[in-house]
């Protein structure tokens, strides 16, 4: 319950109303067919990643060719969708596993980043094995392409008015009231995640790839992404409302499910970074361009 001072602050600075923003989860409604922003976010993230990977592969010393990128585009898409849905069911809604009809209703929402990550890693492992590619270096290149998809996905969460933040007595001008979440102001944690996991982490990854020699040190890029995402997600979880069915779990353990899942990721990311930094960089000969 808000204190008197907090209530006075809220009264002096009325929170934003999500409903007044005129947002809708539906991007296009043809009557017989609808397209949701959430679906477009996934499509935009995958297409942006494919474009970015193709551009990166044109640089000297790339560990994969265009045909491998085409295979990755297909298998990683399957990994994101299947892994994301199964991960959500396993980590957040186990009851879905007992009802296959509900499990396949992707349009109703419910995807897990950690499940999608597992699916993507398995897809990379499969394509790397088939093509004789270096798995770690392939992960390095893919990791640079992921933050864009995270940015679009979190923005879609906000447009849909889901995964809102915790109740706050803050006087920050961007706190808002979300439909279905009560009348108290909350953090727009979806935008916090879009900023940290998407924009900031994406800029860091692009800088490391294009402006440093990190791509010649296998493990540094994927380690940076894994550690950076984990720290960003762990931090934002303090401002994000835990899933209703896992609220008791968060109260009992002191951390949300999202935070517990990021802890091993932090260790893995740090391990890859240390591995890449202590080993000598790859010796890559860059051929001079001719006019």
Image (cartoon, rainbow, N blue to C red):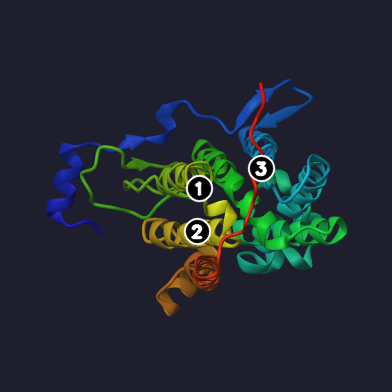
Give the image quarter of residue 118: bottom right
Mark 2 crowdedness (10 Å alpha carbons): few <14, some 14-19, many ≥20: many
- Mark sitting earlier along the chain (1/2): 1
Disc 1 and disc 2 in contact, CB within 8 angstroms: yes
Give SS at disc 2.
Answer: helix
Q: Nearer the viewer, residue 21 or 193?
A: 193
Secondary structure at numbered mark 3 = loop
Q: The N terminus appears in which quarter of the rendering?
A: bottom left
Q: Quadrant of the C terminus?
A: top right
Identify whether 46 is placed above or below 83. above
Instruction: Determine the residue positioned at 63% across, 39% down.
Output: 45
Mark 3–mark 1 distance (CA, rounded to whole Å): 18 Å
Instruction: Name the spot of residue 265 as percent of width and height, x first.
Output: 54, 68
Label 3: which residue?
Answer: 60
Helix or strand or loop: what does disc 1 sit on?
helix
Q: CA distance from mark 1 to mark 2?
A: 8 Å
Going by the image, does 215 lie left or right of 104? left
Which residue is denoted by mark 1 in the rendering?
205
Could you say where residue 70 lies in the image, as x and y percent from the top left?
A: 81, 41
Residue under the image location 56 percent in, 41 percent down: 148
**Label number found at residue 169:** none
Q: Residues within 10 Å of mark 3 (few under 14, many from 20)?
A: few
Residue for point 49% across, 74% down: 249
- In the rendered structure, the answer to whether residue 140 lies left or right of residue 67 reads left
């Amino acid at each position: 319950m808000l204190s008197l001072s907090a209530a006075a602050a809220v009264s002096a600075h009325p929170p934003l109303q999500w409903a007044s923003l005129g947002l809708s989860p539906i991007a296009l409604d043809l009557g017989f067919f609808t397209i949701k922003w959430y679906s477009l976010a996934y499509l935009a993230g995958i297409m942006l990643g494919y474009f970015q990977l193709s551009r990166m592969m044109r640089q000297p010393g790339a560990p994969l060719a265009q045909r491998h990128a085409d295979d990755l585009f297909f298998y990683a898409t399957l990994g994101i969708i299947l892994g994301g849905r199964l991960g959500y069911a396993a980590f957040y809604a186990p009851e879905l596993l007992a009802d296959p009809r509900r499990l396949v209703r992707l349009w109703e929402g419910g995807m897990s980043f950690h499940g999608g990550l597992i699916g993507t890693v398995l897809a990379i492992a499969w394509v790397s094995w088939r093509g004789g590619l270096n798995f770690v270096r392939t992960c390095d290149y893919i990791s640079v392409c992921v933050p864009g998809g995270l940015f679009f996905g979190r923005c879609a969460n906000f447009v849909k008015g889901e995964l809102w933040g915790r109740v706050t007595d803050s006087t920050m001008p961007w706190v808002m009231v979300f439909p279905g979440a009560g009348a108290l102001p909350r953090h727009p944690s979806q935008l916090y995640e879009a900023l940290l996991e998407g924009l900031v982490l994406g800029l860091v990854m692009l800088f490391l790839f294009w402006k440093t020699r990190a791509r010649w040190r296998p493990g540094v890029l994927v380690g940076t992404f894994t550690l950076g995402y984990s720290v960003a997600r762990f931090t934002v979880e303090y401002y994000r409302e835990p899933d209703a069915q896992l609220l008791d779990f968060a109260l009992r353990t002191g951390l949300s499910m999202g935070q517990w899942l990021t802890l091993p990721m932090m260790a893995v990311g740090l391990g890859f970074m240390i591995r890449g930094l202590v080993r000598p960089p790859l010796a890559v000969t860059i051929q001079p361009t001719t006019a």
